[in-house]
Image: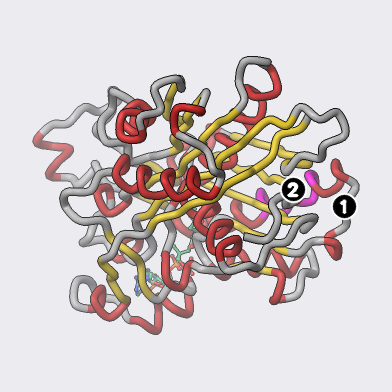
């Protein structure tokens, strides 16, 4: 028995905001944003679009590629920090949009590590229960709705988007799966360095919290930077060691797209050449839980993934949460 990724999908909203647009909003420059982060532009959802609308587009594309009808799905996991509502879950709203009536659905909150957490969750569910055959995992974010557009420390970093993967169980005893190894970690001791201070039960909405702009993302960027490099590096090494795969055997490294300096620091320490390091944050920005799946889908649809390729995936985000997965691509070239 094995679990395979049989479809990928992603969606970026139409509207594009460039660094030059941001220059008109806060005291920043295209040069600062490009050199400090690698970002040149990001996509922004329209006012009418919520996370489930972005999720629907990405999920539909993944299901089409997987030749899977929505009512074949047994489970839907939506990773998001920008759900349509506190409840019902965005997973349930997506279920309705897709017509996936058989699936049970829920949201998973692990910030930027959300898709990796969802992968481990869905893989474990499929492996554990003989009745479950197919799962849809989605990372969907409308980060523009929780971005403080007057804070130059954060507003230049984020973008909106969604990605989705279809996972299926193969009962063949000798079949090879797509997920060789996953390791996930959390450390709540660092909860405050990346958070939204108000709006939850700790600090419900009040005039005071609104005036203090406490419903938006706050981040101690430099602290997060160091922890991100160390966390993704050690998790990456661990999954490769567990699978018995050396860094030189990797075809790609896909890291959460927060900052090209973070990604390159991890790649340098693994002695990975530039051509094996996938970066698309120049045109996406940081899309939190959606970012890794957008990378996978971009690589897949442009024919840059082949059966048998080893892909190291690493992620890092608020919580703190971090982890890595070693994938072995099982799809024939798309
Ligand atoms: O997705 C979740 C995980 N998130 C991350 O992994 C993000 C991790 N952190 C980072 O990517 C980086 O720390 C940032 C991109 C957020 C910041 O880069 P940095 O190199 O760490 O800059 P800094 O925060 O140390 O700030 C350097 C200077 C400061 O000015 P002073 O104090 O040296 O005078 C900032 O005020 O840059 C200033 N600055 C800006 N200047 C122009 C901060 N933001 C901007 C800006 N434009 N947008």
Q: Which of marks 1 and 2 is nearer the N terminus?
A: 1
Total numbered labels placed on residues in the image: 2
Which residue lies under the disc numbered 2?
326
Which image quarter is the C terminus in?
A: bottom right
**Residue in the picture at 35% in, 29% down:** 99
The image shows residue 249 at horizontal and vertical percentages of: 85, 62
Q: Main secondary structure of the magenta part?
A: helix
Q: What element carries label 2?
A: strand
Relative placement, left or right, of 292 versus 43 is right
Q: Name the residue under label 1.
A: 245
The answer to if 234 sits in the magenta stretch is: yes
Q: Please state which of residues 8 and 115 is positioned toward the viewer in this rendering.
A: 8
Say which quarter of the image contains residue 203: top left
Residues at discs 1 and 2 in contact (Cβ within 8 Å): yes
Which quadrant of the figure contains the N terminus? top right
| 330 sits left or right of 55 in the view | right
Q: Looking at the picture, tell me which residue is in the foreground, 102 or 93.
A: 102
Q: Give the range drawn in magenta.
A: 230-239
Quarter of image, ligand 1 = bottom left
Give the label on residue 187, or none. none
Q: Position of residue 258 (x, y in %)?
A: 49, 60
Q: Residue at x 68, y 61 (%)?
A: 333
Q: In this view, does 14 lie above or below 48?
A: below
């Amino acid at each position: 028995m094995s679990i395979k990724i049989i479809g990928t999908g992603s969606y970026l909203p139409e509207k594009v905001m460039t660094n030059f647009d941001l220059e008109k909003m806060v005291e920043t420059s295209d040069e600062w944003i490009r050199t400090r982060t690698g970002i040149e532009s990001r996509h922004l959802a329209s006012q009418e679009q919520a996370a489930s609308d972005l999720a629907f587009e990405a999920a539909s594309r993944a299901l089409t590629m997987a030749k899977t009808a929505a009512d074949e799905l047994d489970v839907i996991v939506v990773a998001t920090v920008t759900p349509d509502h506190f409840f019902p879950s965005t997973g349930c709203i997506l279920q309705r949009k897709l017509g996936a009536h058989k699936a049970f659905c829920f949201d998973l909150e692990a910030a930027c590590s959300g898709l990796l957490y969802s992968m481990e969750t869905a893989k474990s569910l499929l492996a554990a229960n003989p009745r479950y055959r197919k799962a849809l995992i989605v990372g969907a974010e409308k980060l523009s709705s929780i971005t403080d557009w007057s804070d130059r420390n954060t507003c230049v970093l984020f973008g909106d988007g969604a990605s989705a993967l279809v996972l299926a169980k193969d009962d063949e005893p000798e079949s090879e799966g797509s997920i060789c190894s996953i390791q996930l970690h959390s450390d709540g001791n660092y909860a405050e360095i990346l958070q939204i201070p108000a709006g939850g039960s700790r600090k419900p909405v009040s005039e005071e919290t609104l005036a203090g702009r406490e419903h938006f993302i706050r981040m101690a960027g430099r602290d997060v930077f160091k922890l991100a490099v160390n966390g993704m590096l050690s998790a990456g090494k661990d999954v490769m060691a567990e699978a018995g795969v050396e860094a030189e055997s990797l075809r790609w490294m896909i890291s959460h797209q927060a900052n090209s300096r973070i990604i390159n620091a991890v790649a340098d320490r693994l002695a990975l050449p530039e051509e094996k390091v996938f970066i698309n944050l120049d045109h996406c920005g940081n899309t939190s839980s959606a970012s890794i799946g957008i990378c996978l889908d971009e690589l897949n649809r442009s024919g840059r993934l082949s059966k048998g390729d080893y892909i190291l995936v690493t992620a890092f985000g608020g919580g703190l949460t971090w982890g890595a997965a070693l994938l072995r691509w099982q799809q024939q070239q798309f």
